[in-house]
Amino acid sequence: MTRQCTGVAVRAESEINVAGGNPVNVGVRRGRIGMPLVDFDTFTVEAPDGWSDFTEEVEAEDPLYTLAHEDGVGALQFSLALYTAGRVPDPSPAELLDMVKEFGQKKRLGKATALVSESGPPVLAAGSFAWDEDFLRVWQVSDGRNFAFITYTCERQDAGQELATCEQIVRSIEFGRA
């Protein structure tokens, strides 16, 4: 899987010089862990500099929200289910982990590896799969009301390059904040 990215950063940093000659960054909102915020229409994540919204670059009729590094090796994609009414779902980490495993079974990806579940916030579960020549990491994430199904895909030999950053980005999700 080779990906060429030509997207534009969602939040561009600029510097201005103030008295004393020290540059100051302006125009960048930062999240709770200090990284720049990337806003989508129904959620916000924190991502390091160089990570951008590439949704418009995806060749699909109704593309998933897509985040990637401008010089990166993979893509992080988000699919959301937003709470509207009724009983609040409030899933447990174990329930989300079952959803990760079921996804792998339904897609015939084999047994998930590197399984993780956390009580949050956000509540999440994750697992990794070998998918033909590619690596696939899957997360099910919830704030108790809303759900995000998030995937990271890259060539198998590149799996370690961006995964730790993706783990941070996934854990920074805030629903309904854009």
Image (tube, rainbow, N blue to C red):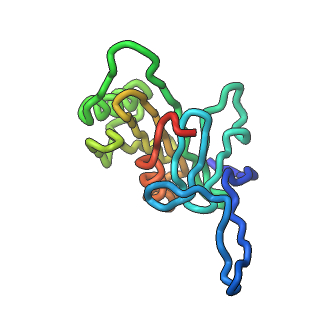
Q: In front: 133, or 158?
A: 158
Closest to the observer: 109 or 174? 174
Q: With 177 as the anchor, is 105 left or right in this view?
A: left
Q: Would you say residue 20 is visible in this rendering?
A: yes
Q: Nearer the viewer, residue 140 or 143?
A: 143
56, 71: nearer the viewer: 56
Q: Residue at x 38, y 27 (%)?
A: 145
* Quadrant in the rendering for residue 41: top right
Is 76 on the left-hand or right-hand side of 105?
Answer: right
Residue 24 percent location from the top left of the image: 65, 73
How many labels were placed on the picture?
0
Residue 157 at least partly seen: no
What residue is rendered at 54% in x and 50% in y? 154
x and y percentages locating residue 143 in the rendered image: 37, 35
Classify 71 as above or below 118: below
Q: Is residue 49 left or right of residue 112?
A: right
- Residue visible at 44% across and 28% down in the picture: 107
For the C terminus, give its image quadrant. Answer: top right
